[in-house]
């Protein structure tokens, strides 16, 4: 891809995200989301592979539909209440339409169908953007409108997302699809607590972004796209592959790793709200995700292939990528003792 075009797309991506998360007016938020969509399309289709073109087409159609619904929701609310302010969402139909639009943008069940296919057709670096930065503006809109949303609808979608993200990830052999269903399951955890403690949703998103970034950087360094490739990739950088197992377990939510913190806080908050049954259900459903994370960790570090693949030692590597990989991996493993400080972030 042309460096100038890549630079323009990246700057537009940052601009669109900044406009959406800092706006108070619905039209400005909608414009930021549109800039984001148009900026990411060249990055998805840059390989010119048929799967990449298919992924960019699907992404454009789905995001255009969601943006249309979001604009219609804001216009409906303005028609009945005379308010264009994001926090003044009062009309019930506008609230339902907005929940649908943001759910489509995020990939929540039952609007998840596009997300695994788009990730499978993209490069690992683009997958990282789609799974993290592109989820931030819609999550911010959910955060701002959380007092107006329907708790029953959000809870149903959240439990369904955790369940489907776990079930569908069980039989996958492509790493990008596994991480796509992992993202859907984590979105369910973020959504279920949105009504009761929106700050906890943001903390969960930040920690999920950090851990997922570490995983994608590691996969990018070892150039791993399938489980069969992962089994032989450990000879490239054995130390990184060993730490990769801990990062996967952190994403699972096992103590004493960083990923345990958001799930622990969400379960505590649901229990305080007298939603013990719901906390029990999503905790049991997260065991499905634990299975395929352990499967990834098993393939990456424990399985020995019948014959070894010899690799030449890389004498020169990208120092920025190495720094990012090391930083995000360390943070995704060792942040649990800093829990009191993390809780003050929002």
Image: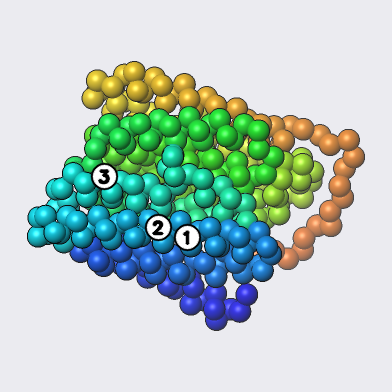
Residue farthest bottom in this picture: 4
Q: Residue at x 24, y 20 (%)?
A: 274
Q: Residue 102, how many percent across, how many down?
A: 35, 50
> Which of the numbered marks, if any, corresponds to residue 61?
1
Q: Secondary structure at mark 2?
A: helix
The quadrant in which residue 281 appears is top left
Nearest the eye: 20 or 317? 20
- Residue carrying label 3: 96
- Residue carrying label 2: 65
Q: How is the image coloured?
A: rainbow
Nearest the eye: 114 or 13? 114
Instruction: Tell me the quarter of the image containing the N terminus.
Output: bottom right
Mark 1 nearby-residue class (10 Å; few <14, some 14–19, many ≥20): few
The quadrant in which residue 126 appears is bottom right
Q: Residue 332, how many percent across, how many down?
A: 50, 43
Instruction: Tell me which label, 2 or 3, sits earlier in the chain.
Output: 2
Q: Residue at x 55, y 70 (%)?
A: 42
């Amino acid at each position: 891809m042309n460096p100038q075009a890549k630079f323009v797309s990246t700057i537009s991506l940052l601009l669109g995200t900044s406009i959406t998360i800092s706006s108070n007016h619905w039209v400005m938020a909608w414009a930021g989301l549109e800039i984001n969509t148009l900026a990411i399309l060249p990055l998805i289709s840059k390989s010119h592979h048929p799967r990449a073109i298919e992924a960019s087409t699907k992404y454009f159609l789905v995001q255009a539909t969601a943006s249309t619904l979001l604009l219609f929701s804001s216009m409906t609310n303005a028609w009945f209440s005379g308010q264009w302010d994001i926090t003044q969402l009062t009309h019930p139909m506008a609230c339902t339409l907005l929940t649908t639009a943001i759910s489509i943008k995020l990939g929540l069940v039952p609007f998840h169908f596009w997300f695994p296919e788009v990730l499978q057709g993209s490069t690992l670096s683009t997958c990282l953007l789609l799974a993290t930065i592109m989820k931030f503006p819609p999550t911010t809109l959910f955060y701002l409108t959380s007092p107006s949303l329907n708790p029953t609808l959000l809870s149903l979608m959240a439990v369904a997302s955790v369940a489907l993200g776990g079930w569908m990830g069980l039989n996958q052999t492509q790493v990008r699809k596994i991480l796509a269903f992992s993202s859907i399951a984590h979105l369910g955890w973020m959504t279920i607590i949105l009504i009761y403690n929106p700050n906890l949703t943001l903390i969960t998103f930040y920690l999920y972004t950090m851990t997922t970034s570490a995983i994608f950087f590691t996969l990018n360094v070892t150039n791993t796209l399938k489980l069969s490739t992962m089994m032989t990739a450990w000879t490239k950088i054995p130390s990184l592959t060993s730490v990769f197992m801990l990062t996967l377990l952190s994403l699972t939510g096992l103590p004493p790793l960083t990923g345990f913190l958001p799930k622990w806080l969400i379960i505590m908050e649901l229990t305080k709200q007298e939603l013990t049954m719901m906390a029990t259900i999503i905790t049991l459903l997260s065991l499905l995700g634990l299975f395929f994370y352990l499967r990834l960790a098993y393939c990456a570090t424990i399985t020995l292939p019948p014959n070894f693949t010899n690799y030449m030692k890389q004498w020169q590597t990208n120092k920025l990528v190495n720094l990012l990989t090391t930083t995000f991996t360390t943070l995704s493993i060792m942040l649990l003792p800093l829990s009191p400080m993390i809780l003050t972030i929002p």
